[in-house]
């Protein structure tokens, strides 16, 4: 049985029981890489724009879902895949969010309610709750209920301006439709 751990230096070490030798792998772990999960809200405050790390797929602990900070952090560009923002629920509660903006307006939004991520996504021009049927039932997030009057209408706002010079601000209604709000 081998155990692998990330050292403070950024290197990974592999420990093999019964041997007194610690082998150091020949790569540096990349900082701020997230695979299969979103960056913590505190990281999103400092690093709003994210891109896919497809060219790093296959590196230890990374796959096709890995995201990394985009070089541009002052404006949402056409290369931005995810950007930080916030969500305001119908009852006035506001939470940090990461918003998917692949080459255009928001098409998905995940917000952190202090305990877990909650996600809403656009499908065929209508917004709907994410239902993670691809995960075992115990690992699925509880889907949002669009009929919940304390949640919807829900407002999404990006932290940064997009290249058109405006923030994206969208209100998602209980019927899944959206409208721009100011």
Image: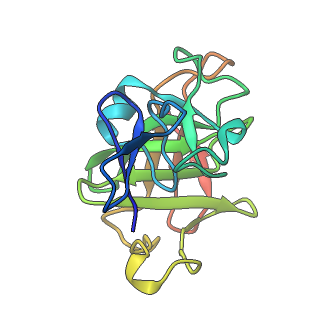
Where is 1 relative to 114, above or below? Answer: below
Q: Nearer the viewer, residue 78 or 89?
A: 78
How many numbered badges does the structure rendering display? 0
Q: Which of 155 and 77 is in front in this view?
A: 77
Q: Which of 37 and 82 is in front in this view?
A: 37
Residue 86 seen in the figure:
no
Residue 16 seen in the figure:
yes
Where is 93 relative to 75, above or below? Answer: below
User: Is 125 left or right of 173, judged from the image as shown?
Assistant: right
Residue 161: x %, y % from top left:
55, 21
Residue pictured at 54% horizontal, 34% vertical:
26
Q: Which of 135 and 169 is in front in this view?
A: 135
Q: Residue furthest bottom?
A: 137
Residue 104: x %, y % from top left:
72, 36
In this figure, which colouring scheme has been used for the structure?
rainbow
Residue 43: x %, y % from top left:
35, 32
Residue 120: x %, y % from top left:
52, 60
Residue pictured at 65% horizontal, 30% vertical:
80
Residue pictured at 55% horizontal, 47% vertical:
60
Residue pictured at 67% horizontal, 45% vertical:
57
Where is 21 relative to 160, above or below? Answer: below
User: Is 161 left or right of 42, judged from the image as shown?
Assistant: right
Q: In which quarter of the image is residue 121?
A: bottom right
| Screen quadrant of the N terminus | bottom left
């Amino acid at each position: 049985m081998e155990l692998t751990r990330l050292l403070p230096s950024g290197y990974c070490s592999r420990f093999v029981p019964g041997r007194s030798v610690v082998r150091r792998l020949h790569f540096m772990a990349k900082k701020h890489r997230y695979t299969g999960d979103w960056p913590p809200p505190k990281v999103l405050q400092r690093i709003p724009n994210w891109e896919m790390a497809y060219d790093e797929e296959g590196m230890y602990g990374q796959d096709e879902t890995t995201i990394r900070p985009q070089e541009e952090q002052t404006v949402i560009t056409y290369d931005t895949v995810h950007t930080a923002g916030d969500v305001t629920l119908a009852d006035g509660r506001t939470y940090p969010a990461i918003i998917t903006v692949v080459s255009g307006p928001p098409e998905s939004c995940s917000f952190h309610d202090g305990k877990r991520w909650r996600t809403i996504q656009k499908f065929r021009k209508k917004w709907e709750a994410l239902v993670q049927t691809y995960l075992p039932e115990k690992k699925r997030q509880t889907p949002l209920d669009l009929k919940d009057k304390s949640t919807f209408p829900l407002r999404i706002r990006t932290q940064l301006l997009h290249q058109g010079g405006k923030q994206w601000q969208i209100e998602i209604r209980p019927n899944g439709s959206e409208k721009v709000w100011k």
